[in-house]
Each structure stands twice: as C-alpha cells, then as structure tokens.
Image: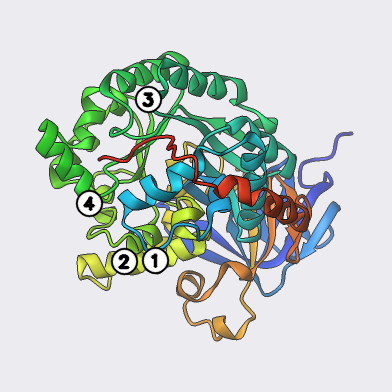
C-alpha cells in the first residue's frame, strides 16, 4: 500500500520557525511555531510544528527563533563584476564607464568571468539570495557556475550593436542552449545592452527573435533622467518610446533601473502587450548622484511589478539585496515625501513575490506555499541589533542584515547551513582572482569595449 503524502518520508522538514506567508490578497503575514515540509524540491506544506512532530524526514532543521522567508531575488546584476569592486569610485557615470570600466572589461577572459561569478554566487548565497538575473559577457561560464553551486539564475548574454549581428546571434544561441538548464534552475533571456548602445534595427530584430522563440528580454533603459532628456533632445523620443516603436514592449521585458521613466512613459508601459517589469537598485543611484529614482509608486499604480536589485558590485560595491530592500523603502519615503510609503510589508512584497514576477518566475518562487519550489532562507533575529521585536516586518526590513541569514536552500538543497557555505570554496576563488588582477586591471592598451554616450 502506497503511503499518503502526509505519511511519506519528506526530504527536509524545517520546524519551530516563524514563516512569512502571503494571503489570497498577497498581503504579508507571519505564522509562528510553524513547519515547512519539502519533498522533491517543492514545498509540500506549511503547517504547525506539532503537525510534523512524528513525520519521518531525510533531514530536519530545528529553527526555533528563526524566520523562514522565500529566498530573495536579485533582479538585475552583473555578477562577474565583483572582480571590479571598488576599482572606479567617486566618478560620474560617463567617466566611470569610459575611463575605467569599459577599458578594463576589454581584458576580460572567460576564466575571469567564471571566478567572478563564483565569488558573486558565494556572496549572494550567504546573503539569502536564491535567484539572480545576470546580464553580462561569457555567460557560458556563469551558467556552469550556477549549475555547480546550486543557485537559481535568469541569464542573458549581453550585446552591443557595435559587435555587428554576431552579438545578437550569440545572445540568442546562449539563451536557447541554456534555457531550462541546471535541472530547470536556469531560465534565459535575450540581453541587448541598452537603447543607447543597441540601435533601433537591432532592437526590432531582438523583439522578433523573442517572439519567435518565446524568450523574454532583459536590458537597461531610461537608466537616469539625463538619458531620457538626451534622447528627447536628439531624437524626439524617450528611451521607453524607443522600446515601444521597436517592439520590445510587445515581449516580456525586464527593464533595469528606469529612474529616467517620465510621466509620459507610463501609458506606454501600461499598454504594453508583453509582461513588463522594472528592477530597481537604489544604492548605485545614490552613488552616482542621480536626481531621481525608480518611480515605484507610479509603476505600482499601473500594475508594473518592481523587483529589487543591486546592479554589479563595480557600481554598488555589494550584492546585498537586504540593503536594496531597506534603501528602496527609505528612498521612496524621501522622494514621495510620504512616510507611509513604502511600508515594511510593501518592501517585503517587492523583495519576494514582485521580484519573482520581475524575472518571470512568479508561478514558481516568491512565496512559501504548497507547490512552489523550495527556495527558503532562515534568518536569525536573536542579535542585539534586532531585539526587541515589536513589528516583525519592520525588524526584517530595517534592522536585520544579510549576515543574519543562517541557512539558504534552493530547490530543497541546502547551500549554506549555519553560515557554512557547502558548494563554493571561497579562499580558493579569492586566491585565483588575486593572481589574475594585474592583467585584468591593465588599461595601458587604450581600448574600450564600447563608448558611453547616452
């Protein structure tokens, strides 16, 4: 006789924790003294600790005093750019790109990308990030790291029009080759860099390829207000209008940054035929002294998901989505002049379900509920900086730190337990990267992979 699911051995049971849950209106709530049952990489149930007391499991985690959250999603980054953390500081974006970053990136080898991706994945796993959307070069190396270390990723091979049609073709070939890879943990996208580096013809061709092959698009657009104003002055259209006229908004598209989205762009985004989302990475905007930020409230009002992101560590210096969550809430309060927006619960919603939707995974991750993939993080709130807890949502957003994450689980596999990384050897990666730094950082050749001119 086959045992019922309730009787069958579980792969993993987490017990005694407080679980962040969403109700049928997607409102954030918390269930105390709860348990999570995982089988075949999926959340089988979220129940009470008493209900699983006698349940057989291959592995159990006693998580009393910890909070279980859906794994965080970094909705836009350039993971291998951790190799350039701190290299280009205190510069306006034009100098940052043209004088430092793009000359250095012309030295990149696949090995540099692999090591950078490995270090980035270690940083994100330790910070409770279980999925990241990456937009970079030599992405075969990143896909290999993702498969090996166990994290989830949404990957795209970036290209510029200056590369000719071969750049676009490589992006397509990568997306088709790796779609569904790593046991389904890898999803893919076409990745034109931005409207100011990819011309209209290339964008239109990308949109056609996306429709033909059922692929989403991930690109930078309306990154800042200067770009929007320069596009209007030179061409009479905003970057968002470029996406509309080239058909990109007819695809499922993830727009990175969007701090230059104008009020006139909002009807275009609302009317888009595809599923449109925006990723916000506020720390970089503050560093570059941009005068505006992603208009989260206006985008919410027209039904556009806004996911949280860090951008690359060359501009942000970290891949810490906890910091992005707190900064998003604070910057939104400041820019709207309204302390009631964004609330801690709203920030947690952006960090979980909205971020999952932004990367096209809203039906698989983003909430801890039966049938969802078991991407789970356990957060320890016993430290003095998180006590006492009067409002758990506020404690998670404004007091907790990435270092409070104790355990990180993806597809039911434990990637970090009690702060010990189980799938990446960080000292080895750091040692190899150190040996490669002189060659990578050399700018004596005078080359750039591209010119920045918005």
Residue 241, percent across and down? 19, 32
Q: Is residue 236 above or below residue 391?
A: above
Tell me which corner region of the image, top left, top right, bottom left or bottom right, holds residue 408.
bottom right
Proximity of marks 2 and 4: CB atoms separated by less than 8 Å: no
Q: Which residue is mark 2?
A: 331
How crowded is the residue under tag 3: few (<14 C-alpha within 10 Å), some, or many (20+)? some
Q: Which residue is mark 3?
A: 162
Work out whether residue 23 or residue 429 is closer to the camera in this orientation and state it. 429
How crowded is the residue under tag 1: few (<14 C-alpha within 10 Å), some, or many (20+)? some
Q: Which corner quadrant holds the N terminus? A: top right
State the colouring used for the structure image: rainbow
Q: Which residue is mark 4?
A: 298
Which numbered disc flags the more N-terminal residue, 3 or 1? 3
Q: Which residue is mark 1?
A: 327
How crowded is the residue under tag 2: few (<14 C-alpha within 10 Å), some, or many (20+)? some
Structural distance between the alpha carbons of marks 3 and 4: 35 Å
Proximity of marks 3 and 1: CB atoms separated by less than 8 Å: no
């Amino acid at each position: 006789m086959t045992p019922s699911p309730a009787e069958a051995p579980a792969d993993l049971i987490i017990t005694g924790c407080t679980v962040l849950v969403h109700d049928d209106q997607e409102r954030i709530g918390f269930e105390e003294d709860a348990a999570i049952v995982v089988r075949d990489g999926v959340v089988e149930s979220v129940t009470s600790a008493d209900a699983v007391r006698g349940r057989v499991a291959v592995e159990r985690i006693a998580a009393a005093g910890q909070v279980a959250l859906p794994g965080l999603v970094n909705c836009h980054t350039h993971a291998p750019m951790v190799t350039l953390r701190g290299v280009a500081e205190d510069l306006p974006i034009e100098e940052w790109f043209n004088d430092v970053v793009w000359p250095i990136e012309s030295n990149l080898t696949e090995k540099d990308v692999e090591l950078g991706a490995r270090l980035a994945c270690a940083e994100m796993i330790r910070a409770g990030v279980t999925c990241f959307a990456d937009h970079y070069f030599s992405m075969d190396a990143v896909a290999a790291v993702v498969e090996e270390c166990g994290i989830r990723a949404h990957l795209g091979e970036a290209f510029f029009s200056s590369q000719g049609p071969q750049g676009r073709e490589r992006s397509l070939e990568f997306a088709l080759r790796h779609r569904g890879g790593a046991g389904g943990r890898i999803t893919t996208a076409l990745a034109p860099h931005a409207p100011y580096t990819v011309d209209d013809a290339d964008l239109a061709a990308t949109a056609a390829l996306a429709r033909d092959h059922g692929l989403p698009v991930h690109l930078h657009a309306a990154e800042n207000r200067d770009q929007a104003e320069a596009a209007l002055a030179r061409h009479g259209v905003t970057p968002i209008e470029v996406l509309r006229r080239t058909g990109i908004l007819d695809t499922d598209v993830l727009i990175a940054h969007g701090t230059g989205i104008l009020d006139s762009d909002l009807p275009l985004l609302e009317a888009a035929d595809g599923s449109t989302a925006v990723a916000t990475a506020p720390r970089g905007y503050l560093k570059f002294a941009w005068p505006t930020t992603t208009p989260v409230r206006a985008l919410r009002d027209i039904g556009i998901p806004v996911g949280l992101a860090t951008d690359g560590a060359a501009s942000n210096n970290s891949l810490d989505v906890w910091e992005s969550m707190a900064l998003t809430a604070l910057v939104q309060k400041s820019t709207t002049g309204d302390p009631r927006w964004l609330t801690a619960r709203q920030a947690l919603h952006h960090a979980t379900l909205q971020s999952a939707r932004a990367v096209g995974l809203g039906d698989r991750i983003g909430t801890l509920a039966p049938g969802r993939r078991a991407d789970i993080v356990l957060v320890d709130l016993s430290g003095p900086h998180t006590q006492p807890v009067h409002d758990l949502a506020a404690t998670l957003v404004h007091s907790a730190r990435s270092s409070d994450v104790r355990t990180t689980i993806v597809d039911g596999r434990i990637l970090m337990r009690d702060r010990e990384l189980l799938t990446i050897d960080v000292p080895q990666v750091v040692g190899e990267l150190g040996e490669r730094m002189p060659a990578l950082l050399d700018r004596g050749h005078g080359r750039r992979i591209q010119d920045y001119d918005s």
